Image (tube, rainbow, N blue to C red):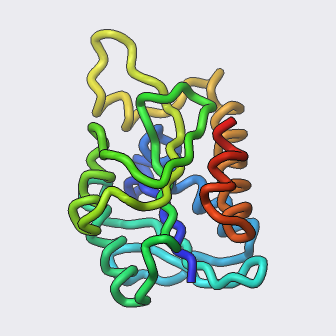
Amino acid sequence: MKLIVGLGNPGKQYENTRHNVGFEVIDELSKRWDIPLNHTKFKGMYGIGHWKGQKVLLLKPLTYMNLSGESIRAVIDYYQIDMEDVLIIYDDLDLPVGKIRLRQKGSPGGHNGIKSTVSHLGTQVFNRIRIGIDRPAAGMSVPDYVLGKFRPEELAIVKETVLKSADACEAWLDRPFLQVMNDYNS
């Protein structure tokens, strides 16, 4: 089974914020693959289905960003999913809006959702898609920025980035992650 996790914060007030682009990719995959997110367990909302012959679990942790690892660890343990079959999608301040970067390992940097994930998984080695949200303007706090909405001129770019990230997830069901990295990081 493949586990695809999108990081974000639950609740109406966080919808369409920079911190929730991971959730947006999961919503796109849920729609594309007709896998409804109709289960709530493991401190998350998830759905299980099949796509391209692969059994897939789509997960949105409901723990709030800073505790995402709790939900991810619970799902991995319950379903006995191998780490190479896990893909985590999240926002990244160090990439410009519209850019994605696939990696197989790396430090959390300042991302609290990834800090929690690394802490609960006990490793920095897992597949990931980082989605650029850019840095805040001088004088704006990072929490206010990541919990804010995209500017109107960024919305079309973000939508394209979500679709490209979902495409990368689909490619991963057919090919090794390293090959997908080479295709999507160009």
- Quadrant showing the C terminus: top right
In percent of width and height, residue 84 lies at 49, 71
Q: Locate residue 66 relative to residue 179 in the image: left or right.
A: left
Q: Locate residue 85 relative to residue 80 in the image: left or right.
A: right
- Between 115 and 37, the residue placed more toward the observer is 115
In percent of width and height, residue 10 lies at 39, 59
The residue positioned 55% from the left and 78% from the top of the image is: 57
- Quadrant showing the N terminus: bottom right
- Between 121 and 147, the residue placed more toward the observer is 121
Q: Locate residue 81 relative to residue 43 in the image: left or right.
A: right
Furthest-top residue in this view: 138
The residue positioned 36% from the left and 66% from the top of the image is: 62
Q: Is residue 169 above or below residue 182?
A: below
Rendered image quadrant of residue 2: bottom right
Q: Is residue 137 above or below residue 147?
A: above
The residue positioned 39% from the left and 80% from the top of the image is: 76
The residue positioned 45% from the left and 79% from the top of the image is: 82
In percent of width and height, residue 141 lies at 27, 23
